[in-house]
Structure formats: structure tokens, C-alpha cells
Image: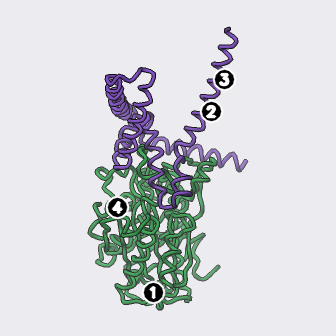
Amino acid sequence: MEKRKENEIKNIYQQMVQKKVPQSSLIKDAIFAFVVGGLICDVGQFFMNLFLSFGISKDDVGYYVATVMVFLGAFLTGLGVYDNIGKYAGAGSIVPITGFANSIVSPAMEYKREGYIFGVGSKMFVIAGPILVYGISSSIIVGIIYYLVKVLAR
Amino acid sequence: MAEKKMGLHTIKLKNPPSILSTATIVGPKEGEGPLKDYFDIVLEDDLFGEKSWEKAESKMLREAVRLAMNKINLSPDQVDYFFAGDLLNQIISSSFAARELGIPFFGLYGACSTLTEAMSLAAMMVDGGFADITIAATSSHFSSAERQFRFPLEHGNQRPPTSQWTVTGAGAVVLGREGKGPYVTYITTGRVVDFGIKDANNMGAAMAPAAADTILRHLKDTGFTAADYDLIMTGDLAKIGREIAADIIKQNGYDITTKFTDAGIEIFDLTTQDVHSGGSGCGCSASVFGGYIYKQLINGNLNRIMIISTGALLSPTSTQQGESIPGIAHAITIERSLEK
């Protein structure tokens, strides 16, 4: 009985809070994310065209572009610019590979003061770690499914 | 009933200790805010010449205490007890400052409520006849709090509009048995209140019920109303939390809205300084009280005020384990003079 009344009060309160809380402006945020995310992709496309014009094969050009984009993300993080882009762009600058670089370089910079082993070494993947774990795990699962489908379809 | 107890959870100090001096040190961002002229030291560099944010925060706390002592030519030997706390794990800013100061030390953790927690205990210690002079001090640092509670500084993420900005600041308050005021006269100690808010980016809402609970108990215990106060300041519910707390108090039959402000709203310009709902952190109420409010009491613009520092008692671990955020708020009444 006590517990039920307590939960009731909590529910009423949470509804009251919901009414007070200003919501993030979804449309504005989405436009920013779209424009900035799109611009990052344009930069990637620019480098892709550049490398293709150098005569690098279509199969390999992805590696070159990824390397350049990771470098750019890391570089802008080091300059202290990337977090300011992220403040406005949100997912627009987190999702591209530059955001991945940011998520590794920023903790590496932050935790340098705890030393190279327990600071940089162990904290470097504090944000990117889950992405790597589940990214790699799901690619393995997808790979196995792909393999089975191929075997069965034969 | 105990001689100094009043009502449920309030005490009336029989020998009200006087605030002898205060000192505040804040970071560059706070130094651009509306209260910039009231702080003793505004740092140009938020590392304060140190190698890490944690070391800088501890130095801010230590130097604030030293400055508060220097203002009235006090040596550490003359101080009986030092009450301090901060937001970092194992309150290292405070204990490392105490290591240098050499004053008998009580380390406290009340999250952002630590200022009034420390002042409550420091005042009781003097009132009870256990000490002649005590110091209460707290600190917080945006960068040390970010790395402990959120993300690395350079990580590009977005903050929701309910989030608060941890103040880089430290404040120290010296209390003494004899002095010309202002005096600490009433203390209402907070209960831990939890209405089930789980969003660590909405701490104002998590703490508002605790603040309202303490303010209501204080008013009921003492028989005061909003009219008895020139100012009621919470620290730091910020904009959203303040509105919610004012609503709860109103629903319970007291209207304090016109006297009610919040340190997290006062310290920053919410429209231009990109702090979303407002400031937070132990250093927020410490620097706003020690800098701005104390000077208003001294020059007579304020006569009787209530300060309610509010704390969100969460840790990154409790949030990850799905716990809701308990809040706490401690109230103290400060009066410019005792004849009233």
C-alpha cells in the first residue's frame, strides 16, 4: 500500500517535470546534423575523386579515404575544433568516421595525465570500445549468416 | 526537546556565529558572467598553473581558504576546524587542500549541497562552544567534473537543454564566535528525497523536491513566511529546477516566487553563455554566496536571507546501474544583525 502510494507520487511528479522540460529542437538539430554530416561526406567524396584521379583502383580507394578522414577527425580534435562542431551538429559529426576518430583521440588527450598505461592506454577506448565490440560482433554474425545462406543456396 | 531545536528539523542557534570573512576564486567563464565584479580572483587560465584539472581545483580551494584568512589576518593555527567538500572521487580537492593548510579537518560529501552542509556544521561547532573559529569551503571545476561524470572535454557531443554547466569556482567562509555579523541564525538540515528522476542531464528536476521539502519544513518549523526574507536562494537547481521547486512550494501553501532565486541562474548569463539550464557544482553556491550575496549583506542591501544548497547524490556507477537520482538540500538563515 505504502509502496503504491509512493509510486503514484513519483508518477505525478515525473509528469509535472515532463511538462516543464524544454524539448530539444528536433527540426533545427536534424537540419544541422544533415548539413554538417553532408559536408563531411562531401570532403570524403572530394578525396575519393582525388585518389581515383591518381589512378588508385576503385576497390582500394576506400582505405585511402578512410585514412585521410580519420586523420582529419583526429587533427581537428587535437586543435580543439571538433567538440565545437559536435555541439551543433550532434549525430551529424558523431556518425561519420571523423566522429569515430574524435571518440578515440579525445579520451587519449584527456587521460594522458594518468600516464601512458592506465591513462591513455586503458581509457582510449572508453567511448569507442562499445562501438568496436558490437560492431565487430555483429559483423561476425552477419558473416556467418552470409556464409550459411551461400552454402544453402548452392 | 533539545534546547536549540525548533519544530521538526530546524535549530535556532543561541550564540549565532558571525561570518568574519569570505573569499572566492572562479574560472574565466564565470569571470565573464554577470557577477564578475564580486569575485576576489578571476583566473585567466583554468589550470591555475597546475598540471591537471584536479590539482587546479584543489589549489583554488586552498587559495580561497588562505585568502579568506588573510583578509582578517588569521593564521591557520587560530582556526579550530575546517569543513570542506567537493565533487571529485574521495573528495581529493578538499583533503589535498587540507594537507597544505594543517587545520583539523572534517571532509564532507553532499554533492552540490556541500556549502550549506559545511556551513551548518561549522556554525553548530561555534554555537555549541566547541570552537572559536571555523572555516567552511567547497570547490568544483568544470573540467574535472566533466571527465569524472560525463565525457572527455574534446569529445564532440550535444547537451540537452536541461543540462547544467559545472561552475569552476571555490569559496571559503570563515565563521567566528565573536564578530559584527552577518550571523548564521537558523539551520534546517535536509532529508534525502528521491522522486524517481533518472536523467543525469536533468539534475535540477531531481533536486527540486529536496529543495522544496527543506524550504517547507523550515517555514513550518520557524513560522516564517516569504515576507520574513529578503532573498531565498537555492544553489543550484538552475532554471528548470527552480520553477519546479517554486511550484511545489506553492502547492503546499507558501508563495516564495518573488524572493526566490538560484545561484545557478545568477552566476551565468543564460542567454549568451551557452550553459543551458544554468550553473551547478559545489563551487556555484560557494562563489555566488561568498562573492555576491555576502557583499549585499555587508552593505545592507539584504538583511535576512536563506541559502539552500542542493545536491544530486548520484555517481556514474549508480546511473549506469539504473538507479534514480536522490536529492538533498540544506538550508541556513543568515541575518545582517541580531536586533530585529
Query: Where does label 1 land, which residue?
Result: B176
Chain of the residue under the numbered disc 2 shown in the image: A
Residue pushed farthest right?
A1
Is residue B246 shown above or below A150? below
Which sits earlier in the primary sequence, circle 4 or circle 1? 1
Tell me: A106 left or right of B31. right
Query: Callout 2: helix, strand or loop?
Result: helix
The Cα–Cα distance between marks 3 and 1, rounded to whole angstroms, is: 74 Å
Kindly identify the amino acid type of the residue bearing the numbered disc 2: Ser
The Cα–Cα distance between marks 4 and 2, rounded to whole angstroms, is: 47 Å
Is residue B116 shown above or below B337? above
Which sits earlier in the primary sequence, circle 2 or circle 3? 2
Query: Where does label 3 land, which residue?
Result: A144
Residue pushed farthest top?
A154
Query: Where does label 2 land, which residue?
Result: A137
Q: Position of residue B71 (x, y in %)?
A: 34, 84
Q: Give me the residue at 28% from left, 66% from top.
A: B36
Colour that chain A carries in the picture: purple
How many residues crowd around disc 3 within 10 Å: few (fewer than 14), some, or many (20 or more)?
few
How many residues crowd around disc 2 within 10 Å: few (fewer than 14), some, or many (20 or more)?
few
Colour that chain B carries in the picture: green
**Disc number for residue B267:** 4
- Foreground tag (4 vs 2): 2
Query: Callout 4: helix, strand or loop?
Result: loop
- Please say which color scheme the image uses: by chain
- Foreground tag (4 vs 1): 4
